[in-house]
Amino acid sequence: MTTAYPRELQIQFDQRVPMRDGITLSADIYMPVGKMQQPGPRPVILSRTPYMKAEVSLQTAKYFVRHGYIFVAMDVRGRGDSDGDFVPYFNEGRDGYDAVEWCANQPWSNGNVGTIGASYGGRIQWLTAVERPPHLKAMVVLVPPSDPFVETPTGTPSPMHLCWLHLVSGRALQSMEVVEWEQVYQHLPLLTMDESVGRSISSWRTEMQHTQLDSYWEPLCYQQKFDRVDVPALHISGWYDDEQIGTPLNYIGMTTKGATPEARVNQRLLMGPWGHNTNADSRIGDVDFGPQAIIDMRAEQLRWYDRYLKGQPVEVGAPVRIFVMGNNEWRNEQEWPLARTRWTPYYFHSQGRANSRFGNGLLSPIQPDTEPADTYLYDPANAVPFITDATSSQIGGPDDYSSLQRRDDVLVYASEPLQEDVEVTGPITVNLYASSSAPDTDFMAMLIDVWPNGFRQRLCDSMVRARFRNGMDKPELIEPGQIYQYTIDCWNVSQVFKAGHRICVQVTSSAFPKYDRNQNTGAPLGITSELAVAEQRIYHDAEHPSAVILPVIPSAE
């Protein structure tokens, strides 16, 4: 069926695209008419989505058609008008290959196919690329999830992942507003949390049966397979994207391990002051990054496609373009992480009472000598909250953590007010020396900018589950009371801590419901409702120098 709408555009709805197993997927094809129609086939931009292809922005399709492309929007298997069953991610590599090659072989196509998509639509581009469809020539990948357990190194899905699984249950999008998510997240055992939503969600139950990195997850581990990929990619994310870590890792992976020298060179990283919905607003929560935070994103994408699908000699910009928060300005760079980085440890200090922002915790470049450990009780029945919307549409932002830092189960290490601006740009790592009275527990670290007016702006964070301290494929319980060294990879940031501000690290044992609560029992994950209180100790002395490693960028002379 062909419909003329609007005048510059005609849409061929529900075109059936055969997959290798006989299933057909549904695609809507946006093509030019009238003044936009030119003789001969065109390159194709393919968008595959679980969020209903009819929801694709008509203005986006119109924009690319106006600039000489065919735009194809496709429902993934089991969603919308496509046949088959929806099993998140597991069919997307093969289906993506078949979809790319179908587009390449249509009479309106010149054989050059690019892909575009965000979030789920970003990750499935990588799953497609590792299958190496010969006609895939360019990708624009926005906010893609990483490999399993990179974002949530707990062995279990985030409770908020259940919100997304509910959204994509069935063939049409489900309403998230009808569910009391705060109550759902309290449900134990974790295995049956879907019952609190009011539906049985098989993907949740299956994921809960694979609580370590085993062979089940191998088909989704694209970040170990960049040596199979030879496609130029524009990598786009935001510092407050709740799946941010994947984008810089993918850029690094492709520039160091891409299948060809050309592929390793033809990568570009774009990081803005955005959440998961990139380039939507200059403000996130209480922080406004200024009008310069919003860019002409379609023009960025168009230049990429013009270069790699049309072969035009257009400039696509520096290899890395980042928005430096604090100064609130864009800057071009040549690599990531930045070659001029000075990796600077800021050590934890206290007199044994770093509890809350009213304690005596201190952050300093000076190494500790003899200092008492800090102690707190972690009670999973009274977990430290993570400030977020209840749904999974945007998990966290530049939120004010001053109220949560009143709690005694939150350790706060803050520098003295800075005498001059300090730029921190790159990946953040916390080296933590800790013990617990429990056989398994969690430790969570967060980097914070403390403003002179008391606002405590979250920058980035992550956590470690003690049983996975040696890797997600090597679970091993800990000995209660024994000191272990933990490494917490707190993702990436670009922030200028202004003079008068303080650099702060918050340490605790939960960030709920971003991560599920460690129940402190050491039992197999997800199957028990039992909770135990753990006594946690954080050490910072000459033998156990807990610290945050900051990627400090020297100021220009």
Image (cartoon, grey):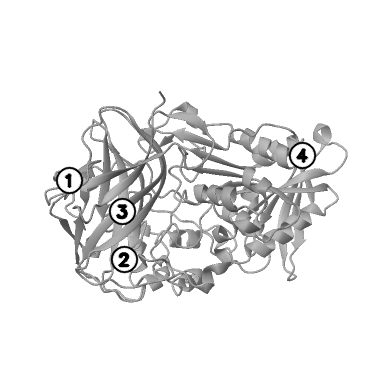
- Left or right of 436? Residue 265 is right
- Left or right of 246? Residue 4 is right
- Left or right of 202? Residue 529 is left
Q: Position of residue 56 (x, y in %)?
A: 63, 47
Decide which of 452, 4 is in the foreground and name it: 452
251 up-or-down from 24: above or below? above
Give the alpha-carbon distance from disc 1 to disc 3, as whole Å.
16 Å
Q: Earlier in the sequence, mark 4 or mark 2?
A: 4
**Residue 208 lies in quadrant:** bottom left
Q: At numbered mark 2, what does the secondary structure look like: helix, strand or loop? A: helix
Mark 1 or 3: in front is 3
Give the alpha-carbon distance from disc 4 to disc 3, as whole Å.
48 Å
Instruction: Name the residue beneath numbered marker 2.
Output: 466
Q: Residues within 10 Å of mark 4 (few under 14, many from 20)?
A: some
316 up-or-down from 522: above or below? above
Q: Amino acid at mark 4?
A: Lys
Q: Amino acid at mark 3?
A: Asn
Q: Is residue 383 visible?
A: no
| The C terminus - image quarter | top left
Decide which of 366, 250 is in the foreground and name it: 366
Q: Amino acid at mark 1?
A: Gly
Instruction: Name the residue beneath numbered marker 4.
Output: 310
Which mark, by number, is residue 361? Answer: 1
Mark 4 or 1: in front is 1
Question: Is mark 1 in CB contact (under 8 Å) with mark 2?
Answer: no
Q: Position of residue 317 (x, y in %)?
A: 61, 33
Mark 4 or 3: in front is 3
Q: Residues within 10 Å of mark 1 (few under 14, many from 20)?
A: many
Q: Residues within 10 Å of mark 2 (few under 14, many from 20)?
A: many
